[in-house]
Image: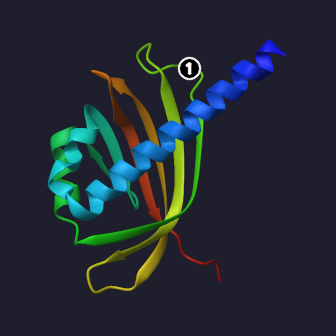
Amino acid sequence: MIMDQELKTEVDQACRTAEDFTKHYYESMDKRRHLILRMYMDTSVLVWNGTGTTGKEAIGKFLIDLPVSEHSLWSLDAQRVLDQVSNKLAFLIKVTGSVKFSARGTKPFTQTFMITTQDDKWKIVSDCYRFQELLS
């Protein structure tokens, strides 16, 4: 019974963390993108539709250069990563939704984050963003 309670506590913590983190991330991405690089670690990795970028400064430049966006989230899932990152608590967060960039049409997307704590703040270790296309 104790194990079930511990597991429930971890699941609840993962869900709360994911909700708070994604709310802050997408508000920053859509409204205050110049601040978003604060959410990445110095050694973070971003894979954006197959294009890889490494390091906080390079990721910040890449994201700043994207057109203005408007994200709408459909689903969110989170789980604790059992092998901690640098001996720190880590979570894997999976997001699905739609995004509209400037005057272009709306596209479905998925985004997967691995986050960990650094200086008592959640920081992105890795970030994978993909547009979703229907199979023919």
> Residue 131 at x, y = what percent?
46, 68
Residue at screen point 23% across, 57% down: 63
Residue annotated with mark 1: 83
**Residue type (three-letter) at the residue carrying disc 1:** Asp
Query: Mark 1, residues whose alpha carbon is within 10 Å: few (<14), some, or many (≥20)?
Result: few
Residue at screen point 15% across, 42% down: 57
Secondary structure under badge 1?
A: loop
34 lies left or right of 100 = left
From what the image shows, is residue 135 above or below residue 20? below
128 lies left or right of 46 = right
Residue at screen point 40% across, 52% down: 23
81 lies left or right of 3 = left
Q: What scheme was used to colour the molecule?
A: rainbow
> Residue 115 at x, y = what percent?
42, 34
> Residue 35 at x, y = what percent?
17, 49
Residue at screen point 65% across, 32% down: 11
